[in-house]
């Protein structure tokens, strides 16, 4: 049996071990509440559970455990058997960390091959107190909230940071953007579901792909999309390409409307 286990730090290793979760096997078998319906597509299975563990001082801590079997992608480095898609997500979170871009907090990544089946586990800290952009936009009480402009500006900031690093999210929808608002300081924004994130050369092409998806999928209230785009262009350094970007986004959005549902 081939096995790889990566703890994010000695501190996280000790935390998980303190809760009897200090190995791939224990994380693979632990029970929890599914926060998404398990996916049985592509000849494999994948599921996400929410668990509550305890810190050394007894305080509770919620964590997300993502588990999959036979969900793989092929690349030049993994041309035959492929590698788990969660490994790609793990690498992308690490990419964001190295660039100083806020991301989900990794606790553990592991994978193993059992009788020809490739299994993977990714454990991250639950985003306690965060809400998705979709959830915020669908809340009538938020539409006139004075914090809404701050939220939009903070979302534009992190998206611009990602794109300036020549990283394309790949499925930038409102449900994948999580925000925590506090009375003091700017809203904290984290991007999730990073399995499809990849490096691309053209920041302009990245913007067209990700922003086109974000505009179509989110229900932007009032002039919030315009506010977002204005802030994004400045932070991404694309002001000189504003007209071209507006035109390209418009064409992409119109083309998407022509596709059958």
Image (cartoon, rainbow, N blue to C red):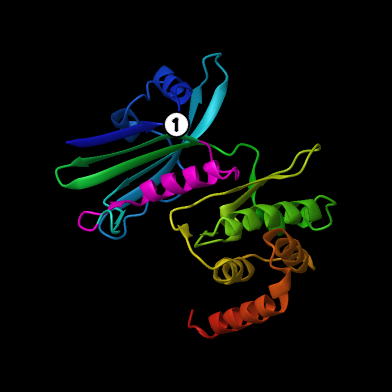
| Residue 37 in view in this figure | yes
Q: Position of residue 67 (x, y in %)?
A: 36, 43
- Where is residue 233, by image quadrant? bottom right
Q: Position of residue 74 (x, y in %)?
A: 28, 59
Does residue 18 appear left or right of residue 43 in this picture? right
Q: Position of residue 76 (x, y in %)?
A: 28, 59
Q: Tell me the residue at 36%/33% (across/down).
A: 6
- Where is residue 229, by image quadrant? bottom right
Q: Residues within 10 Å of mark 1 (few under 14, many from 20)?
A: some
Q: Tell me the residue at 69%/77% (across/down).
A: 246
Q: Nearer the viewer, residue 127 or 241?
A: 241
Does residue 190 appear left or right of residue 183 in this picture? left
Query: Magenta segment: does it hold 28?
Result: no
Does residue 116 appear left or right of residue 250 in this picture? left
Residue lying at the far bottom in this picture: please name it: 258
- Secondary structure category for the residue under label 1: loop
Say how many tags the image has.
1
| Residue 35 in view in this figure | no
- Where is residue 1, by image quadrant? top left
Residue lying at the far top in this picture: please name it: 57
Q: Tell me the residue at 63%/57% (across/down).
A: 159
Q: Position of residue 41 (x, y in %)?
A: 31, 59
* 60 w.r.t. 219: above or below: above
Residue marked by disc 1? 8
* 66 w.r.t. 231: above or below: above
Q: Tell me where the magenta segment starts and ends, as one range.
A: 79-105
* 174 w.r.t. 89: above or below: below
């Amino acid at each position: 049996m081939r096995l790889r286990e990566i703890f994010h730090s000695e501190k996280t290793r000790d935390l998980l071990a303190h809760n009897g979760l200090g190995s791939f096997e224990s994380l693979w078998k632990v029970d929890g509440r599914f926060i998404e319906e398990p996916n049985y597509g592509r000849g494999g299975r994948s599921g996400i559970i929410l668990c509550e563990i305890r810190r050394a001082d007894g305080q509770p801590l919620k964590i997300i455990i993502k588990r999959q079997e036979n969900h793989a992608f092929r690349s030049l480095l993994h041309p035959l058997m492929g590698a788990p898609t969660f490994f790609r997500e793990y690498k992308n979170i690490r990419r964001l960390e190295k660039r100083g871009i806020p991301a989900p907090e990794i606790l553990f990544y592991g994978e193993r091959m059992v009788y020809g089946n490739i299994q993977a586990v990714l454990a991250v800290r639950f985003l306690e107190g965060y809400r998705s952009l979709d959830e915020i936009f669908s809340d009538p009480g938020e539409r006139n909230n004075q914090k809404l402009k701050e939220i939009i500006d903070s979302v534009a900031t992190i998206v611009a940071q990602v794109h300036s690093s020549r990283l394309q999210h790949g499925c930038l929808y409102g449900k994948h953007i999580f925000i925590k608002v506090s009375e003091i300081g700017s809203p904290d924004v984290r991007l999730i579901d990073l399995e499809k994130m990849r490096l691309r050369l053209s920041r302009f092409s990245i913007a067209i792909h990700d922003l086109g998806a974000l505009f179509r999928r989110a229900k932007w209230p009032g002039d919030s999309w315009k506010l977002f785009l204005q802030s994004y262009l400045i932070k991404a350094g694309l002001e000189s390409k504003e007209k071209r970007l507006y035109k390209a986004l418009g064409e992409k959005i119109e083309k998407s409307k022509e596709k059958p549902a």
